[in-house]
Image (cartoon, rainbow, N blue to C red):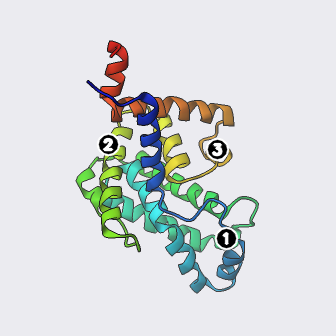
Amino acid sequence: MNTSSPTTASQSMLWLIAALADAPPLDVDDTALVRQAQQDLQKFTELYERYVPRVYRYLLVRVGNMADAQDLTSQTFIAAMENLDKYKGQRPFLAWLFGIAHNKAADYYRRSRPETDLEEAETVPDSDEHPDDLVDQRLSLELVARKLKTIAPDRAEAISLRLIAGLEVAEVARLMDRNEPAVRMLLHRGLRDLQAQLYPAVENGLEDGS
């Protein structure tokens, strides 16, 4: 008999997805570093190192292909560096950066049908994490990426931007051209769908009354 509870399963799923972000806290203030980089592009390296894991994981989940995700990650940071003088600080730098990544992913979908080569998802950019932690996160990324492909694209995008990219709901709404209540509904329904995909035994147990 399955002893997992829906609450436990949902909490585990949320922890698993949130763990994939592997990036600085959302309240990190990039203002000073961005200003330095606007004066000296060599300082942009610090911004790159700070956010490349998160951008890469977001793009990998969106396109499902390591080579394309790496290429889109490079394109994102090149575009950010080339347009850094246009960033005026009216929104968080992370949100501005993910606006570029979001557009790169959208361009990718317009150009070609994405392929899901999730065995390649086990390779991610270098980090300082413990090897055992990296293994766990790679396997988790592969699982979540595969399951996100099975739910509605707008729900998958909302989950990717909110929980993997780590953007606030307001920024997700801005990128997706939706209002905040609509984004929250996408997240709610998307997480419900994803929970059903990740924990089918729990869902079946509920349906069977077990």
Residue highlighted by disc 3: 169
Residue highlighted by disc 2: 146
Kindly identify the amino acid type of the residue bearing the numbered disc 3: Val
Residue at image coords 69%, 73%: 85
Q: Residues within 10 Å of mark 1 (few under 14, many from 20)?
A: some
Q: Position of residue 93 (x, y in %)?
A: 65, 64
Q: Tell which circle, 2 or 3, labels the residue nearer the N-terminal end.
A: 2
- Gap between marks 3 and 1, in whole Å? 19 Å
Q: Tell which circle, 2 or 1, labels the residue nearer the N-terminal end.
A: 1
Kindly identify the amino acid type of the residue bearing the numbered disc 2: Arg
The quadrant of the image that shows the N terminus is top left
Q: Residues within 10 Å of mark 2 (few under 14, many from 20)?
A: some
Q: Secondary structure at mark 2?
A: helix
- Gap between marks 2 and 3, in whole Å? 24 Å
Residue at image coords 42%, 57%: 57
Above or below, comparing residue 97 to residue 31 in the picture: above
Q: Position of residue 3 (x, y in %)?
A: 33, 29
Is 149 left or right of 1, judged from the image as shown? right
Residue highlighted by disc 1: 30
Residue at image coords 36%, 45%: 144
